Image (spheres, grey):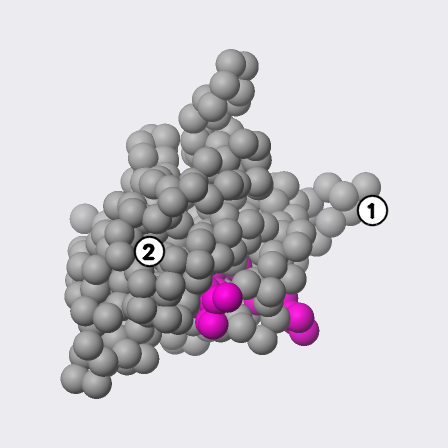
Amino acid sequence: MIAYGENIQVFCGNSNPKFAQTICEQLGVPMGKAVVTHFADGEASVSLEETVRGADVFLIQSTCKPVNDNLMELLVMIDACRRASAGRITAVIPYFGYARQDRKAKSRDPISAKLVANMLTAAGANRILTMDLHAPQIQGFFDIPLDHLLGNVTFVDYFMKKFPEDVYNHDDFVVVSPDVGSVSRARNFAAKVHMGLAIVDKRRPKANVCEVMNIIGDVKGKTCILYDDMVDTAGSLCNAAKALAEGGAKEIYACATHGVLSGPAYERLEASPIKEMVFLNTIPEVANTPSGKLKFLDVAPVFARAISHIHGATSIADLF
């Protein structure tokens, strides 16, 4: 027996309201009425303007920049729903911030991803829905159920339509992992698009700075698709693209689930040999972006279907 009522309610914070509105349209439900603002000193303030008692509540909020503001908004929304006697609270986090701090890289480092998981649980979240965690093992940081959606399904559909096998010989294409840590996700993507695999081996002397060493695999004369989970300052990706161009690649495309795009990212992408850079809209696109190479694919329908399955207590495996 389902412990919560049949009523499904969706609320959102300020991180990506357009994404949340699309989800509501796909679900055929109105956006929940709530005021999410900040006091003069920066404190988050949430006021729910309709009842959630016994409802199945979904709170949509990417913890993208400003990361701490968006995270605090989500925590306060969860607390507000819990204190208003919501039947179940699901935190829908298309982009999970702090995911890169998933281990102790050196002595006395925090494991901030685990801390955030603890905070979400303590606030009152009953389950989590997210996409393409930087490290899949972060799922184990949560003591509540977590549904982990995969962005490669959307990328597979996009590139198979862009380069159909009845027109293009996929032996002339290769999926490239920009670093050793992304090999597993790149291998899975390569298998689905029936392309070869190559790896860019790099050395990172310090944060956000990398030095490309060599390429493992044959890229000469081939169309390359760089595949990663996120792009922050774009240094790693653009250095990898440069190495591929120097290695004789015919054309270079790139795709990544989360477009964090901090600092000089836009300028680097524009100056790079990448022909097209494709993201999912888990993080909202910045208006008037200076780079014409960027393309964003909408995954709100994927999240809407996942929410529908979660609400109906049915498997979401068919989404993959």
Residue 81 location (% of width, % of height): 50, 47
Out of 269 and 260, give the one closest to the viewer.
Answer: 269
Q: Distance between the residues labelled 2 and 1?
A: 47 Å
Residue 291 location (% of width, % of height): 61, 71
Mark toward the viewer: 2 or 1: 2
Determine whether the residue tagged by mark 1 lies in a helix, strand or loop.
loop
Q: Is residue 86 left or right of residue 307?
A: right
Q: Are marks 2 and 1 in contact (CB under 8 Å)?
A: no
Q: In this view, does 307 lie to the left or right of 192?
A: right
Residue type beneath disc 2: Val
**Magenta span includes 282:** yes
> From this viewpoint, which residue is outermost toward the top?
107
Q: Residue at point 57% right, 32% down?
A: 206
Determine whether the residue tagged by mark 2 lies in a helix, strand or loop.
strand
Q: Residue at point 37% right, 65% down?
A: 249
Number of residues whose C-alpha sits closer than 10 Å to that of mark 2, classed few (under 14), some (14–19) or many (20 or more): many
Extent of the magenta region: 273-290
Residue type beneath disc 1: Ala
Picture quadrant where residue 13 is located:
bottom right
Residue 129 seen in render: no
Out of 117 and 126, give the one closest to the viewer.
Answer: 117
Judging by the rendered image, the residue that carries numbered circle 1 is: 40
Which label number is shown at residue 176?
Answer: 2
